[in-house]
Image (cartoon, rainbow, N blue to C red):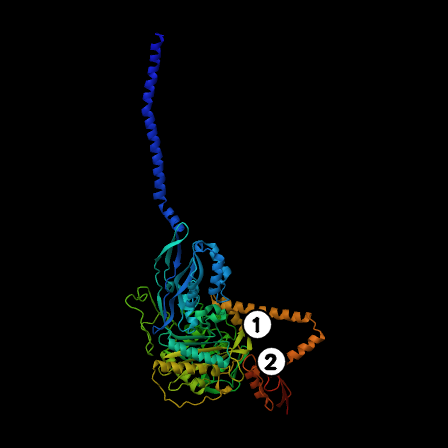
Amino acid sequence: MNQTAPFQLRANRPRGSNAASLLPLRFWLICLAMLIWVSLIAVKLFWLQIMRHQEFVEKAQKQQQHTFEVAPRRGVLYDRNLRELAMTVQADSIFAVPSEIDDKTATVHQLAQIVHANPEDSWTTEAQINERVDASRGFAWIARRVKPEVAAKVKALNLKGIYFQKEFERFYPDNQIAAQVLGYVGVDDNGLGGMEQKFDAPLHGKPGRMYAAVDARRRVMGSTEREPEPGANLELTIDENIQFIAEKALDAAMQRTKADNGTVVIQDVHTGQILALAIRPTFNPNDFRHATPALLRDHAVSDVYEPGSTFKLVTYASAIDQHIVKPDDMIDCQGGAITFNGRTIHDDQHDHLGVITVEQALEHSSDVAAVKLALRMGRDNFYNYIRDFGFGARSGLELPGETRGLLRRPDRWGATSIGSIAIGQEIGVTPIQLVSMVSTIANGGVYLPPHILMAEQGKDGKVVGQPTTQLAAEPLHGGEELPDPLPPGAHRVISTMSAAEMRKMMEAVVLYGTGKSAQLNGYSSGGKTGTAQKIDPATHTYSKTMHIASFAGIAPVNSPVIAVAVVLDNPKGGGVSYYGGAASAPVFTQVAQETLEYLGIPHDIDLRPLSASKNLTAKDVEPAQEETGDASELVAAMNDLPADDPLRESISNAKASAKAAKAQKQADAKSDTLHQPTVAEAQSSATTAQPQVVAVSLPVGTDGVKVPSLVGLPIRQVVQQAALAGLNLQVTGRGLVRSQEPAAGSVVAPGSQLTVHCAR
């Protein structure tokens, strides 16, 4: 025992010393582990709180806030006297926080009963509201920009989870005044037509933001806003009073002539500014949802037509400016007919003019004289003058959808195209181009690009491009000076002397020629009438029953202030009512007279007592021109238009409509063939249909033509009367008319056949 005890003591001694030596190692290992653990936590915290801070902030905002745009206040559209044409007002919009609604179905049903007042509004139907409410927990629109009475009814329900937000709504205080010029604004405050579309970006402004904070249970705790930046204000060259004058006169003309559509453009001849642009039919931009695409179309810039005899102003002005003729030179009208390159062009059937002065040739609207002048000029010179007058190119007017018109290069003209273009055929122009041409003659021979935008005012109240000025009223005072320097795009077309001679010739047209119904009281006036046959886009041929009646004029002649273009598409009625001198010239008279008096322009001729207007005859007005132009060549010129030209789309739509109508007609014919009616059906059909085929049951002046009385008349007068009525004539026998079919006074479709039986 004594020997082993020391051994055990020696054995135990080293073990104790090893344990003591491991204590520091364990300590440091624990410290190292703690350090690594703390370092990892620190790195993780650094990664989360520093490196990914913005990411988690955004996630938190998405969970705790709902963000949506707040539309800015749209800029105001003013007329030239700073009267508001389009403005922005506040309206209540209704939204829901779906997470707060206990019974969604019942709530939505109650709301739909109130907000869905318009059956055509699919956005506020109960199904659509339900779909939006189910799609989100934090926010859903119920209805936007509701009327005050609708908002009051919803507020009276005091529904849980239903809130109101003030939004801006576009308002047009004059309703349909200048509707196609101003355009309209959609639900999302985007411009969808006219100036609203063309200048949508500056008018719109910069949207603001609304932040709605919610808690963990998606309850709204409050909201903050970032204010939107308002849009720029625009001042137009339109004068609200002159616009009203133009629209009132056009309304009366549309009712009188039953035209398909009409356009009146009034321009300041010394600046190119558009004072009025009236289109009919029209729409109310406050209620644009009920407007058809046809009502929204701006015919002044997007549609073209053959100008007919109004284009002779270009022909005569070009010839006079080239010193080919003078107004008092003599020209041989050859008895009213000229033949060249196998085609014969005739003057009016009432005129068999011989050697007369150039001025008289314009008074009588001689086609022969115009063709002769064009031939003496040559196609290249004539083409250059046409381009200088602004035809065949976009004018740059600040409205969307402008077409450049139809004008082929001389190397693509046919053998007789120069003669056709000289009298306003084989060329397509817009009313804006027509009025700009007349203004060029009126102001002394300088083409001024038309404008409808006066100035643009930014959010700082300063005019864009002119930082020291603000919008100011610019009433028209009838100045006689052209801008100095001339604006971009302006250029001289004819000399001052040539322009003065043309103005006196235009005055003679009104005093002694085809424009007598364009005479003013106390003011001298000048102009040119035009009556052109329309081209059927489906058949590429001239229509015998559809016409364009136009008048382009200036006033006063001695010191012109305004130029006016009046274009009526397809005026209807018997006699001479569809002629330019009968349909459009009276519109010029009313518009020019009232505009000059409104502007306070001094009278330049003596006032005369007012007298009742006389009934016009074929000798007093511009007749419809003979079909001398090549309609197919003009239609083919549309292929040269750029892809964005609105005319290409309109022609495609016309062709599609014609094909659809033809297919429907064939289908109806096939259906009639397949269905063999029974005897009872035939008898029933005969008794019910019989009154409808009686010609006199159709109202005169709608889609029918009243058959004139021809019994006892010679053949020559019969031909004239049938042509005036737009009827196809078939003559049997010789001498005086003894009988006719249909009977006089009957109302038939335009273009129907009229048969007369003659005997000596």
The image shows residue 595 at horizontal and vertical percentages of 38, 80
The image shows residue 27 at horizontal and vertical percentages of 32, 27
Secondary structure beneath label 2: loop
Residue nearer the viewer, 225 or 561: 225
Residue nearer the viewer, 319 or 284: 284
The image shows residue 574 at horizontal and vertical percentages of 54, 83
Residue 439 appears anywhere in the view:
no
Q: Mark 2 or 1 closer to N-term?
A: 1
- The answer to which image quadrant residue 82 occupies is bottom left
**Crowdedness of circle 1 by 10 Å Cα count: few (<14), some, many (20+)?**
few
Secondary structure beneath label 1: loop
Residue nearer the viewer, 272 or 309: 272
Residue 754 appears anywhere in the view:
yes
Quadrant containing the C terminus in the rendered view: bottom right
| Residue 497, numbered circle | none
- The answer to which image quadrant residue 433 occupies is bottom left
Q: What residue sits 50% from the left and 72% below the top?
A: 413
> What amino acid type is highlighted by mark number 2?
Ser
**Crowdedness of circle 2 by 10 Å Cα count: few (<14), some, many (20+)?**
some
Label 1 sits on residue: 539
> What amino acid type is highlighted by mark number 1?
Thr
Q: Is residue 408 above or below residue 10?
A: below
| Residue 752, numbered circle | 2
Quadrant containing the N terminus in the rendered view: top left
Residue sitting at the far left: 468
Q: Nearer the viewer, mark 2 or mark 1?
A: 2
**Spatial distance from mark 2 to mark 1, Cα to Cα?**
18 Å
